[in-house]
Image (tube, rainbow, N blue to C red):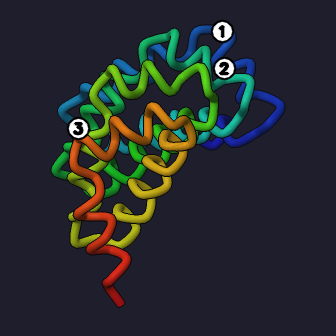
Amino acid sequence: RNISVSPQYEGEIVRAGGVAPLVALLRSFNKNIVEHAAVTLRNLSVNPENKAQMVRDGCLPPVIACLGSPESKVQEQAAIVIRNLALEPQNEEAILSSGAVAPLIALLRSPFERLQQHACVALRNLSVNDANELRIAQEGALPPLIFLLRSP
């Protein structure tokens, strides 16, 4: 987990095939292992050079599944991974077609402000593209977003 923060190693971890084992750990029954794997993927997803490769390596379905985890820490890390990966325009369609919008909208209704914020930014990053903006609105994002605008 700590080595994934280092710019010196974060690209190398992805190039060496490190995403697949981390993705496998997201399916663990041990919540601590899942959280550490999600944090590591979050750290790797910051590097622009890693974003497209992480999607090609299959991280989206398990990360999106983590958005529905009973553990808020895991949900938060998954939302950050999606937020970061959505900054790469070539990832947008894969993120949308993998079903990320509905669970991100659900997180907008979370009692945890940090989850609301990360979900909101992930949806914002996806909505830069006009076609995506329409899809996000059609999936029901507007009512919870408007509700959040009215909250203190």
Disc 3 marks which amino acid?
Answer: Asn
Rendered residue at 34%/55% (across/down) = 73
Where 147 falls versus 95 (above or below)?
below
Disc 2 marks which amino acid?
Answer: Ile
Asked which secondary structure carries label 2, the reply is helix
Q: Percent x, y for residue 95?
A: 41, 26
Residue ID for mark 2: 13
Residue ID for mark 1: 16
Q: CA distance from mark 3 to mark 1?
A: 25 Å
Disc 1 marks which amino acid?
Answer: Ala
Q: Percent x, y for residue 94?
A: 43, 19
Instruction: Give the class, few, some or many, for how many residues have Cα within 10 Å of label 1's Cα (few <14, many ≥20).
Output: few
Residue ID for mark 3: 30
Of residues 5 and 113, the one nearer the viewer is 113
Q: Is residue 82 left or right of residue 51?
A: left
Q: Earlier in the sequence, mark 3 or mark 1?
A: 1
Labels 1 & 2 near each other (Cβ < 8 A) = yes
Q: CA distance from mark 1 to mark 2?
A: 5 Å
Q: Is residue 133 left or right of residue 52?
A: left
Instruction: Give the class, few, some or many, for how many residues have Cα within 10 Å of label 3's Cα (few <14, many ≥20).
Output: few
Please name which of the two marks, 2 or 3, marks the residue nearer to the observer: 2
Instruction: Give the class, few, some or many, for how many residues have Cα within 10 Å of label 2's Cα (few <14, many ≥20).
Output: some
